[in-house]
Image (cartoon, rainbow, N blue to C red):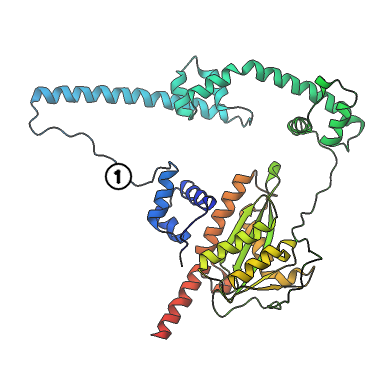
Amino acid sequence: MARKTYPAEFRRDAVELYRTTPSATVAGIAADLGIMDSTLSAWIKAAGVPIRGQSRPAGRSAPPDETPEQELARLRSRVVELEDERRKLATEREILRAAAKYFGRGDELVSRFQFVAEHSNTFEVKRLCQVLCVARSSFYKWLAAAPARAARAAGDEALAARIRAVHVQDRACGAPRITVELNDGAAPDARVNHKRVARVMREHRIAGIRLRRRVRTTVPDPGAALVPDLLERDFTASEPNAKYVGDITYLPCGDDGFLYLATVIDCFSRRLVGWSIADHMRTDLVTDALLAAAATRGTLAGAVMHTDHGAQYGAKVYAQLCTRLGVSRSMGAVGTSADNAMAESFNATLKRETLAGAHGWPDSPTARHEVFTWITRYNTRRRHSTCGYLSPTDYENAHHAANLTLAA
């Protein structure tokens, strides 16, 4: 049964998936997500994203009773328009050529505002801003702030020198300890914030010694009630919506830290019927994923939900939600990943195919978008060996079709 209401996060991700997939159509994306074409079109229009393939208004045609003199005047006017358009395109082409060389240096600190400032004597600021898609008001505001920016940069350089002096004495020091050292005995107006110290250290590649930390997502709750293992490592099912597995995995996002993904996977088809992404591991993360699965299926009554012994799955709120939805809880042994192997395998596949060997995503928005895109493809396009090399959605559809044939 299709979902009647959709979270704002789901709507934004669906629009972003359409915007960043040039070959996709509204109908194709809507079919993949299991929503109506008109619903997705409304979301896209509300977000201000143009819909590809819409017909444009036809050009002006000659009036049926136009005299030769009127035709000549109209054609001359059209020639002037085309000349203006040609000059405009030639100017934009020159700007883009200059921009390609400028930004081709690979200097991440170079901004579009800086490019406009350096080329304002050659081209109009208005045209430069139009081609580079920046607001003129923002450019002039940036230009007016140049003295303050220079003073701040000089202050950061002076602070970097102070940081290096402390860091040379003890290379194990990180930002917190260096901040304390800098502020020790300093006058109130000379004290620095630990966030500024961390930023300057990052920009100048000054780092303390640290070991790679293993991110632990399964933290057992010793006070939780015992839950039996109803699957006993049998991750198969004879029909959809009977047995599910779930887990939490971390998504490394560079300087943004981590996002966390909670999953609900159908054992019959390996389809991801519910998921939730957040920057925390509170119980809301797993309850949101289970509610999303219930919305996708229409009902989870009579199904089994198998997880590990994470505190989120042992929480009272999660247990109450399972009872309300008619779901039987199941848990494997503590510290035994094989008892939830299917969910662990899904997490490994997701990271292997999205990261392609990288240690993480550059930031949280990129991670969220790429995971959302991959999940959509996983459910609807990616062929799964367990499903006879059909996608999970196609495998379920084939099962329903076979049942209808038998019933007939």
Label 1: how many Cα within 10 Å (few below 14, some 14–19, many 20+):
few
Quadrant holding the C terminus: bottom left
Residue 407 sits above or below residue 192 on the image: below
Rendered location of residue 64, percent (x, y): 9, 34
In front: 226, or 337? Answer: 226
Identity of the residue drawn at 87% across and 36% down: 173
Residue lying furthest right in this view?
169
Identity of the residue drawn at 78% across and 32% down: 201
Rendered location of residue 287, percent (x, y): 63, 61
Rendered location of residue 156, percent (x, y): 75, 23
In front: 281, or 371? Answer: 281
Q: Quadrant of residue 274?
A: bottom right
Task: Count numbered badges in the picture.
Answer: 1
Give the SS element for disc 1.
Answer: loop
Residue 175 visible within the image: yes
Q: Amino acid under label 1?
A: Ser
Identity of the residue drawn at 59% across and 78% down: 237
Q: Quadrant of residue 103?
A: top right
Identity of the residue drawn at 60% across and 69% down: 324
In front: 277, or 159? Answer: 277
Q: Which residue is mark 1?
A: 55
Residue 382 visible within the image: no
Residue 71 sits above or below residue 317 on the image: above
- Image check: 259 left or right of 218? left
Q: Quadrant of residue 290?
A: bottom right
- Image check: 332 left or right of 353? right
Rendered location of residue 71, percent (x, y): 13, 26
